[in-house]
Image (spheres, grey):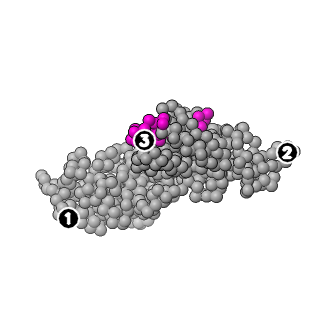
Amino acid sequence: MTPTDLSTVLRDATTTVLTRRGLDTSVVPETVVVERPRNPDHGDYATNIALQIGKRVATAPRDLAGWLVEELRSQPSIASAEIAGPGFVNLRLAAATQNATVATVLSAGSDYGRGTDLQGTAINLEFVSANPTGPIHLGGTRWAAVGDALGRVLDAQGAAVTREYYFNDHGTQIDRFARSLQAAALGEQTPEEGYAGAYIGEIAADVVAANPGVLERPEADRLEVFRSTGVELMFDHIKRSLDDFGTHFEVFTHENSMFTSGSVDECIAELKANGNLYENDGAWWLRSTDFGDDKDRVVIKRDGEAAYIAGDIAYFRDKRRRGFDLCIYMLGADHHGYIKRLKAAAGALGDDPATVEVLIGQMVNLVRDGVPVRMSKRAGTVITLDDLVDAVGVDGARYSLIRSSVDVNLDIDLDLLTTQSNENPVYYVQYAHARLSAIARNAADLGITASDAHLELLAEPAEGELIRTLGDFPAVVATAAHLREPHRICRYLESLAASYHRFYDRCRVLPQGDEEPGDIHAARLALCSATRQVIANGLDLVGVSAPERM
């Protein structure tokens, strides 16, 4: 029985005791909160449902808790139920009920942990979307890892997720990029506000190689070649880096297409027609304050050029026209203003602002020997995705970027991530999986199988703790999806690995010496197999490998 299953049992039991006494059952929440007590002596699980609804049915919480305890004690799945404090209920599951979790995991296999909370919801998940003016920097790398993991977690809850990269190939940054390439090819100094780094020289040389004679063309033609070919080459590099990092996108949308397709012009005409775009001082302004923004935003500047938000408005409408129920944008730390801005754009188009969700990620710093690492030889002063992967590998980079909430600044200790010790979080989890794989191989050599294991034999406290931790996994995945927090998967995996190592230290899995294999060995092998499966499932959700040997 998982906590989700127990929540249903508690909801039904609470409804039963209220009905029996003629009290209002509508106060019973759809999901009854179930928690693991910090002190295992208090029970396997605890609930505060009596405290939550007691006053709403004019009943003292301890009285309601007493009725609930009486009802629960009559159920074969509950070994014991006790009142604690002002109205908490502590529970212990019957051994057969608890141990059935092992069979559930083994039966579900790679599907264990998946749910249906978001089934039928089409989600557009836009992340990274770095400008094609240089390699992906650390901020973008964080989103490459977290965004991919979030997509996997949302998918695990039944959502139809489309991962999308918005390619910012329109505007002044592209002009500066083209001029920087041209200057490098001509052996000139980098233009003011241009881009530097070895990659500029490399791409410039590739542009010249792909376009013989380009340096002899008129400047306007020459610059256009550096713009179009340079952007294409840079984008190819970005795609390769992301693919090598295990981050893949179903859709790449070019910002410039919003303008060349006429989508921006259509949006402007629509906003003028519905009165949400007005003219003032020679510019056209969005009435974004009418929809919760801090100030109205310029959409068409005085010179007639579209402001950046014009493309954003058209892009949002394009997503909605493609049938997405929810549009999630994952943006950098300097984009807080976009939250209200994008929601206001949705409202101005007559859409529901709730279809827009913006996640903001904070900065990432690398540390080696306690000193910040600040320099990339290839990209100038920027640390890139490729730099991080070269230093710690794909698994180490992804896991370290995902395991912390994006709401906080993140310091990555390069020394720690290259050590093979329990202090290294990704090594700790992967080693648990490798250790479990070794047990499976050794059990096969001894002829021990987990099929038809007598799970009722798993009665040791360390076995119970491990089984309950396995049972937590579906709820962890559901919460990670609901809160958009894939780091919860990593933290859970570390907790599961710790629980497994405690079990392994206290409970011998395989026979030693002349000891004959018995039912207890098969039962513990089943528990190990279930643990191995859940670790593999969790690592897959964050895009990290589950090695069988280390």
- Disc 2 versus disc 1: nearer the observer: 2
**Residue 445: mark:** none
| Closest to the observer, 325 or 19 | 19
| Closest to the observer, 378 or 238 | 238
**Residue 53: mark:** 3
**Is label 3 in contact with label 1 (beta carbons under 8 Å)?**
no
Residue at the extreme left: 281
Q: Label 2 vs label 1: CA separation?
A: 82 Å
The x, y position of residue 302, in whole percent, is 16, 55
Q: Is residue 54 magenta?
A: yes
Residue located at (53% from left, 33% from top): 84
Residue located at (57% from left, 49% from top): 2
Residue located at (62% from left, 54% from top): 105
- Disc 1: which residue: 269
Residue located at (75% from left, 45% from top): 509
- Disc 2: which residue: 515
**Is label 2 in contact with label 3 (beta carbons under 8 Å)?**
no
The x, y position of residue 50, in whole percent, is 47, 39
Callout 2: 10 Å neighbours few (<14), some, many (20+)?
A: few
Query: Where does the magenta region start and end?
Result: 40-63
Q: Is residue 378 magenta?
A: no
Task: Choose the circle earlier in sequence order: 2 or 1.
Answer: 1
The x, y position of residue 184, in whole percent, is 39, 53
